[in-house]
Amino acid sequence: MALKVVILAAGKSTRMKSDTPKVLHRVAGVPLLRWVLEQAATLEPEQIIVIVGHEADRVRKAFAGYPGLTFVTQQPQQGTGHAVMQARAQLAGFAGDVAVLCGDVPLIQPATLAALRAAHAGHAATVLTTELEQPGSYGRVVRDASGRVTAIVEARDLARGQERIHEINSGTYLFDAPALLACLDRLTTANAQGEYYLTDVIRLLAADGRPVAAHLCEDSREVLGINTRQDLALCDTIARRRVADALMLSGVTILDPASTYIEAGVQIGPDTVIYPFSAIHAGVTIGSHCEIGPFAHLRGGTKLGNNCKVGAFVETKNAVYGAGSKSGHLAYLGDVTLGRNVNIGAGSIVANYDGERKHHTEIGDDAFIGCGTVLVAPVKVGKNAQTGANTVVPRGKDVPDNTVVVGAPARVLKTRQGKAT
Ligand code: UD1
Ligand code: MG
């Protein structure tokens, strides 16, 4: 069955109390909307329509490079049903299914969406639900005596007795497109929030006698919606644990996942050991047999070859390490390329920022950077060169190969012997 996806991402995120649109907040280093776009892609849709509204330009700009998206603006934002109405032009005449995903529900697994799709066969609408001990502000799934879904009632609109319902609406649905479009025309704002609720489509279809189903997601952590900063922190913990689990299964030792912060999209080779209290940001790649931390901070653009070390209180950013290069303690390496088997002494700094621009530094194979060295970028340190303790190498004063420099600013001391191989 042909399928289109509509992602709801126009809301203001009042409860986040943020200047940033909710879908640009990050979980495990990745914006919420990207998580949802990746879910959408697993359904292999013929079109992905993203409804934007609050700070629409920021959201569009942040995803300008993402292929194949159709952005539609919802202005003003009058509820989830009103949001889907904005996609009328894209859905008109479409005879397939429409998956509606919430931009603030990032953790649904592909297998769950596949199961939802299978459950939807032969139905006008199928809602993904789960059971929660404390259903809080989620919409509740109302069933009749025979167990048929008859409605979804928002927390603020609950009738007496309905607060006892534990099955909640995840905000994720599959609809038959013509059935959805017909019901959108019938939505009203007669509810506690004065909004057009998408959830009322379920009630209308059920009342018309159309087949409506609910598919229960066993693992309620997948369908957590992010409405507050507390929800954000909870989802972040779950997402990062997933990342750590996948890495451990692929052969990485993470001694204490709970105190290790590894974002999504980090690649780490087998037999690398990550000690606690280390932060490794999205896009970082680490080879095998490396040693990271404790208390290491690997920021964007860091790429380590095999057998490297980034030890305690070392921060890296856009730092490329050749195999066997080591920075054991207390260092900052920003915008720098290290050859192979470079040793960075404790307390060394690459001063990459001159107050206006960032500059690049290169350190050749087998170079030995003495403790407390400051390399003022842009500068090159040659192969097998050495700096003495507390050396300052000024910008542009490149250190030739096989040369030992000392002092502040550095002056040539002598020639260094080639490394015996
Ligand atoms: C919604 C559901 C609720 C469900 C919960 C799951 C409705 C009426 N309620 O409640 O049943 O349990 O999700 O997380 O649908 N949005 C727009 N335009 C709008 C309003 C919202 O695009 O005018 C977007 C938001 O940006 C958000 C999503 O729709 O991504 C859900 O909106 P939100 O306000 O978070 O609804 P909930 O109260 O969470
Ligand atoms: Mg929500």
Image: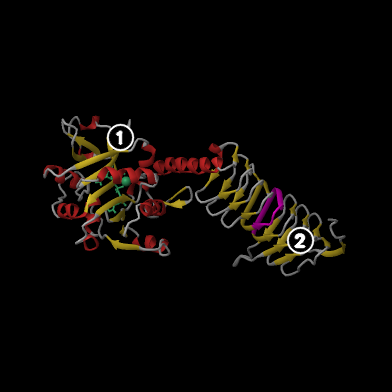
Q: Secondary structure at mark 2?
A: strand
| Chief SS of the magenta region | strand
Left or right of 248: which side holds 171? Answer: left
C-beta proximity under 8 Å, tags 2 and 1:
no
Give above or below for 377 relative to 126. Answer: below
Rendered image: mark on residue 81: none
Left or right of 157: which side holds 50? Answer: right
Give above or below for 149 relative to 3. Answer: above
Name which quarter of the figure residue 401 lies in: bottom right
On the image, the x and y values in percent for residue 336 come to 66, 61
Earlier in the chain: of badge 2 and badge 1, it is 1
- Which residue is at a point 16% across and 33% down the rendered structure image? 144
Amino acid type at mark 1: Pro
Left or right of 364: which side holds 65? Answer: left
Left or right of 241: which side holds 251? Answer: right
The residue singled out by tag 2 in the image is 392
On the image, the x and y values in percent for residue 249 come to 54, 40
Amino acid type at mark 2: Val
Look at the image and say whether residue 46 sits in the magenta stretch: no
The residue singled out by tag 1 in the image is 135
On the image, the x and y values in percent for residue 158 come to 20, 36
Whether residue 336 is visible here, answered yes or no, is: yes
Task: Sort mark 1 into few (<14), some (14-19) or many (20+) by Cα contacts within 10 Å.
Answer: some
Looking at the rendering, the stretch of residues picked out in magenta corresponds to 320-334
Whether residue 108 is visible here, answered yes or no, is: no
Numbered label tally: 2
